[in-house]
Image (cartoon, coloured by chain):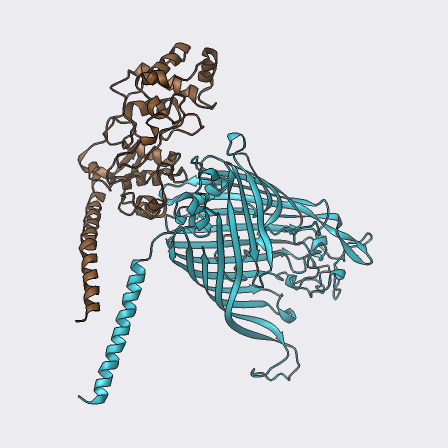
Amino acid sequence: MRIGTLLCVRRFSYVQSFATATLGLIILFLSFTPSANALPAFARKYGLRCSACHETWPILNNFGLKFRDNGYQLMNDHDAPIWQNPSYWPVTFRITPIWHRLSSLNSVDTYTNVSTTLPEGTLAVQRITSSGFDLSGLDFHTGGTLEKNISFYVLPSSDPTATFHFETVMARFDNLFGSSWLNIKVGRFELNNLLSEKRMVQLTGNGGIYQTYHFIPVGDGNIFGQMGSNQLGMEYLGHSYNDRTRISAALLTSSDGNENLITGANTYNGFFTFDQGLDLGKLGVDRLGAYAFVGEAATYYRTSSGTPIPGSGITNKGFSREGFTGQFYFGAHFDVNFVTQHGSDNAWFGQGYGNPINPGSAENGIPSCPTSCLANATPGTTLPLGSQAPTWNGYTLEARYVYSPQLIFIGEFEAERMSRQANGPGYVPGFTGPNGITGAAPSNLGNINNYDGLIRYNPFMTSRAGMALQAEYNVFHQVGTGPMGANTNTNELLLGLDFDF
Amino acid sequence: MNAQLMRWLRLLAVLGFFAVPTLVLAQLTQSQQEEWLHTPAVASHIGNLTGNANSGTVKYDYRRYCVGCHGELGDGNGEVAQWLDPPMWPKPRDFELAIFKCRSTPTGTLPTDEDLYDTIGRGLDRSAMPIWNTFTNQERADLVAWIKHFSPRWQTEKAGTPIQIPPEPEITPDRVKAGQDVFARVQCWKCHGVAGQANGPSASTLTDDQSRPIAPFNFTDGSRPKCGSTDQDIYRIFMTGLDGTPMPSFADNIKPEEAWDLVFFLRTLQPHNQYNKREKEIAKQLNLKPLNALKLSQ
């Protein structure tokens, strides 16, 4: 045998061995993959699999919803902490390191290594693609019962720069007078949304929120109607014993969850929900519901040397969001969730009045400016001619194929459509109002299309810890809010880890 | 062959000696259960509902909600069973044995489909078994059928005939006192304690039929009885017993009217609830005192 042949055979043998070993490892890995799923904090307490409460962690199924509605209790006479092992500590850490590739439009005036005929220094819209490893922050979930029917949830959360804030701080008083129809929650908490934004698994910045829950017309100054944000207030929740019927009413400060009453004074809003579970036999328990979010917020802040005084808001104006929600299971593996919304803001909000947190925020499609340039409806201010109350319609559709609690496929589509712009047809041509938009706005300004698709796999998730591998792709499109009047158009590929322990 | 290799081979041989029979046994059990799955005996019938163990979704539901405790083979050895420490957290039911606490049928017999259906929906207090009333009725009926495919007993035995519960008589002070006499005579106090506080002389020694510690029911702490809270449910427990536990059936020891007397007396031991308003009034009126344990022991 020639040496070359010998080397070739030996190399083949190495390759074969490597392939066999790899295959063996994969088989071994898959063989020993436990089929458990559990959120450690509660799963440890009750000895239940996470899949009992979660469609896939952290999305709740009907049983998980009932567990939460009962104040994190199974109602089995072992709910009080007195029954727990003294070493039990109801804490879960969650962190999501990712790699992502983001492509978006930017206004650019440097053209090194870019094929363009534009002279250097000319501002133009260019697509920029960047990629790298990233981190979405760290959450410390802690929650549980303090006594039977009294529970708490605290969630200190950090952004990627390790700046902490309290995402959730609340106490619950459940089953008052022995009735499941009397439950009270106080503090900062997530609203009773059937499709929970805080439990979504999407990692992208665009799909990581439901656009329907946060949509604001371009230039609009009303930040208070964002039903996806955790809010400050108190909530009444009532539900039937088996949780088929659920109602809630929350009284909230119009602050979008921000502390210190800086967004106004004596302004409140209410969030009301109702949903009914229907026994559809083999299909499962499907839900249909409705919600309304109505309230007022200040548009005028008294000033000191020209600077608005926090908490001094008056001249309250109204807003509303209302819609339907649904959760339809088609057997054990497939379900479709939807939320619709009809939104309406007072014309003053439409002109940019109201937002003292991020006045003239770039996110709302108008250039950012310091606090002092807050659009302030001082006495005597009149609305520009042609101003009107903006209204819009939108929906979120999320379909999930749950192969098993460990493997889930999710497809999400959202559409937001303006039906009436704040700058109506009669808006003075060429006039730039407080919302920063010149003249009458095009009818489709601010319309959104958002597409998101992901695969999430939990190679393991025991009652002590869990980890998910996720691949996701997102496309986000918004009319007229990109650089230099172009559309916002981003697409993002994400590969991430989501683990809790 | 070097010594190290030999050591590895020996280790493998020892592991194989234990692992292979275990795996074969598990495989055999599984293949038998697969066969039972397709027999008419496992179908469940609850009112108008027919539960099907081959419904397509039931296996998935079992895997999602039940397998963590009851295990793939229904043998009660799910992954979290190890964390459940009796008597505070009873071990999960072994469906292979088909021995169930909550039955409407005589002791030693199989429960009816309704019994299992009700247990799933009611849950078992003071255990890790939650109230699974979030399933649809059909899903619950299918799960009953699925549970029945784990044990050969369902292939060879029929469910017992539910016991007859006579109509509940009117409560009188005499009946409550008579109930206390029954409580003393059949020695309920030995486990449950003279005041029903689960502190009788035998309480600390009790074990279930698999020699695991088990605690008697405490009537005074407001807990709900495992197999239902109504008067009929409590009556049923005396007459059927809780199979697999030290709580026997008293069907041969007490007459139906005596069983009702006992129900009324036990209601006086419970804190105020929706079921015992009249009994508590009578106890107060009679100035009913707990039995004297010392006297009873003599």
Q: Name the image quarter holding the C terminus of chain A.
A: bottom left
Q: Is A360 situated left or right of A173 in this image? A: right
Give the letter of the brown chain: B
Residue drawn at x 55%, y 40% as measured from the top left? A172
Q: Is A8 situated left or right of A137 in this image? A: left
Q: Name the image quarter holding the N terminus of chain A.
A: bottom left
**Residue furthest top as drawn:** B174
Q: Is A344 situated left or right of B250 in this image? A: right
**Along the line of sight, which residue is nearer the eye, A501 or A96?**
A501
Residue drawn at x 26%, y 81% as measured from the top left? A11
Q: How many marks?
A: 0
Seen in the picture, residue A227 relative to A454 is either above or below; the reply is above
**Along the line of sight, which residue is nearer the eye, A458 or A283?**
A458
On the image, the x and y values in percent for residue B200 come to 36, 25
Residue drawn at x 82%, y 53% as measured from the top left? A380
On the image, the x and y values in percent for residue B55 come to 29, 45
Seen in the picture, residue A431 relative to B289 is either above or below; the reply is below
Give the letter of the cyan chain: A
**Along the line of sight, which residue is nearer the eye, A491 or A370?**
A370
Q: Is residue A455 visible?
A: no
**Residue furthest bottom as drawn:** A2
Q: Is residue A499 visible?
A: yes
Residue drawn at x 61%, y 52% as measured from the top left? A226
On the image, the x and y values in percent for residue A255 come to 66, 50
**Along the line of sight, which residue is nearer the eye, A271 or A130?**
A130
